[in-house]
Image: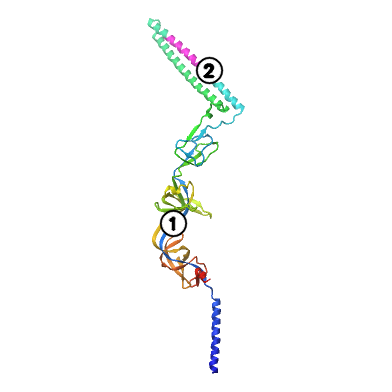
Amino acid sequence: MMTNRRWITRGSWLLLATLAIGALVWAFLPAPVDVDVVAVARGPFVKTVDEDGKTRVRERYVISAPLAGRLLRVALKVGDDVQEGALVATLVPSAPAFLDVRTERGLAERVGVVEAEQLRAEAAVERATVALTQAQSDLARAATLAQQGFTSKQGLEHTQQEVEFKAKELKVAQYEAHAVTHQVAFAKAALAQARGGAGGARDQGWAIRAPIAGRVLRVAQESEAVVQVGAPIVELGDPRNLEVAVDVLTTDAALIAPGQPVELDRGGGAAALAGRVRRVEPAAFTKVSALGVEEQRVNVVIDLVSPPAQWADLGDAFRVDARIVVERRDDAVTIPVSALFRHDGGWAVFAARDGRARLQPVQIGSRSGVTATVVRGAEPGDLVIAYPTDAIADGVRVRPRAQRARAG
């Protein structure tokens, strides 16, 4: 009887000791790591190249100054409609350089000099005319005497040559008088320009007209100013004829081809617009990113496919977010990119099974910014851990945050 009671007492103490040790072990065991789990799914997969771009008028015309001169104030404003052939701007000759009294007096004296030369040239013409008339009279008398036999044939020929010589002298005098007339006009024009008088070249203007019908996109020079040849004045275009230019990395440009569909998001809650890639430009350029990194980029030109009524509120240089579809699959096994990490030169995930994390290598195919296709290593319905931290390792106890919420 005493023996049985003693064994019962020992068994009770042994049970209590076992329970105490178990409680201590449970207390010091690491708690499960709270994780977010996502499911491997089967469904459509779309790979896109996402970049921001700008709208631009397809055909734009920059009207520039055809001559150097003074541009009068441009009355057109941005947004004004312009018809073909309409007056855009007026260009007049520049004001003459500032001249002092001495220079102006010199120009006036120059006018006096050339006017005197003109009088002398006119006198020379009159003198040559009188000489020619006298020579013609002498020729008539010599011809009469030759018929009567009172003069020799050589004398008559000499008189004829004298008439021809006097005629040539008259022409030379007339040419000199004509040249002096132009010199007088040039000297007077220079003096008139210096004095800024009315009737000079400053009163004339060159009308610059629109080559097409369109809308004013930019006024490069609105105020009156002196411009040089080729200086831009007004930029015209048709805002109803828009395209979108998106610069992408050259590595992404290798995946883009003409004809691929594009989704254009203009923000503000407006419906997305449909587009189509028209051209991938063959030349790249260097662009510095916001982080200061030099990147090689290339422009992708996109046509708007949506009806014009849906993008009537868009204008030139409006910002849009472009999603260029480079690959589309209707039935694919997809896994979130947030669950992938590098392992042994390949890719792997942590699968959540029976409350523990299990390392699981996977082979993936195409990747987008959110999901990737799985070639093998995971099946639809598998739960994997998203954004695994350093606390996650193979065999570590995990607890999905959704279960913790329900337990609370």
From this view, report whether residue 110 is shown above or below residue 151. Answer: below
Between residue 381 and residue 258, name the one nearer to us: 381
Q: How is the image coloured?
A: rainbow
Q: Position of residue 18 (x, y in %)?
A: 54, 83
Q: Residues within 10 Å of mark 1 (few under 14, many from 20)?
A: many
Q: How many marks?
A: 2
Query: Do labels 2 and 1 touch, CB within 8 Å?
Result: no
Judge whether 139 appears above or below 181 on screen.
above
Are there few (<14), some (14-19), or many (20+) residues within 10 Å of tag 2?
Answer: some
Residue 281 visible at all? no
Q: Which residue is mark 2?
A: 119
Q: Tag 1's secondary structure?
A: strand
Query: Which amino acid, mark 1?
Result: Thr
Residue 120 is marked as: none
Q: What is the quadrant of the N terminus in the image?
A: bottom right
Q: Is residue 344 above or below residue 225?
A: below
User: Does the segment drawn in magenta span residue 124?
Assistant: yes
Nearer mark to the viewer, of 2 and 1: 1
In the depicted view, which residue is nearer to us: 393 or 162?
A: 393
For the residue marked with disc 2, what is the amino acid?
Leu
Q: CA distance from mark 2 to mark 1?
A: 88 Å
172 drawn magenta: no
Left-right relation of 106 to 375? right
The residue identified by callout 1 is 48
48 relative position to 15: left or right: left
Q: What is the x, y in percent for residue 61?
A: 46, 41
Q: Which residues are magenta?
A: 119-139
By secondary structure, the bulk of the magenta-drawn segment is best described as helix
Mark 2 or mark 1: whose residue is earlier in sequence: 1
